[in-house]
Amino acid sequence: MISTNDMRPGQTLELEGSLFTIINYQHVKPGKGQAFVKTKLKNVKTGAVADKTFRADEKVNLAVLDKRAMQYLYADEAGLVFMDSESYEQVHVDPDLLGDSRRFLSDGVTCLIPTFEGTPVGAELPNTLALAISDTEPGLKGDRVSGALKPATLETGATVQVPLFIEKGERIKIDTRSGNYISRA
């Protein structure tokens, strides 16, 4: 239990049986009445963002998450299988916890897996990944127009927009948060 006065962005709270990460925090002391704390909370499982107001010095449950680096192995009917890099223990993670970034997941990628009471509650891919292009239209001589893009299919099956000069078989860097092309790898 911590006081609402001690809350900070990035901390995870256990409220009403769910886990919420504090995105924004503001302590408000109006001219009249009691002080209060306005927060913007993100649900760890669903990703939904909600505003919540607490009384000043109210006690809330602080959830202690254990973040471990785990390597992605494969997918099966039970979910995505990750292996702890230190203990070699394997855990199953619900694919929905990765959201849209799951399309960039390839064998051997190391992710941060936050666990709460031994249960995985999310997965964080690295911000950038280097992936090979498995299929795209051939680039022609003179295709150097800045800003022109074409679709390319990556080794993971994801389709991204790349500049015209990128060829099949090249490795490119992708921003996993937005799904945008960054540069050649």
Image: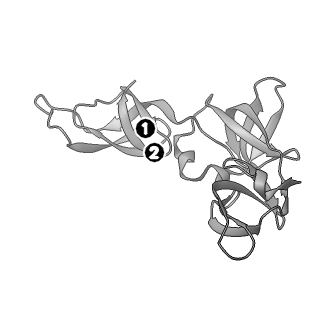
* Residue 132 screen position, x and y as percent: 43, 29
Taking the image as shown, residue 52 lies to the left or right of residue 147, namely right
Name the residue at 72% across, 31% down.
70
Quarter-of-image position of residue 1: bottom right
Kindly identify which residue carries mark 1. 154
Q: Residues within 10 Å of mark 1 (few under 14, many from 20)?
A: many
The residues bearing labels 1 and 2 have C-alpha atoms spaced at a distance of 5 Å
Count of numbered circles on the image: 2
x and y percentages locating residue 135 in the rendered image: 35, 37
Task: Give left or right: position of 60 versus 10.
Answer: right
Where's residue 150, x and y in %?
26, 44
Point out which mark residue 158 bears.
2
> Residue visible at 28% across and 31% down?
166
Q: Position of residue 53 (x, y in %)?
A: 71, 69
Residue lying at the far left of the rendered structure:
142
Q: Residue at x 57, y 34 (%)?
A: 126
Secondary element at tag 1: strand
Name the amino acid type tagged 1.
Answer: Leu
The answer to whether 110 appears left or right of 104 in the picture is: right
Amino acid, disc 2: Ala
Kindly indicate the quadrant of the structure image that contains residue 72.
top right
At label 2, counting other C-alpha atoms closer than 10 Å, the crowd grade (few under 14, some 14-19, many 20 or more) is some
Asked whether 95 or 74 is in front, the reply is 95
Location of the C terminus by quadrant is top left
**CB under 8 Å between callouts 1 and 2?**
yes
Disc 2 is placed on an element classified as loop
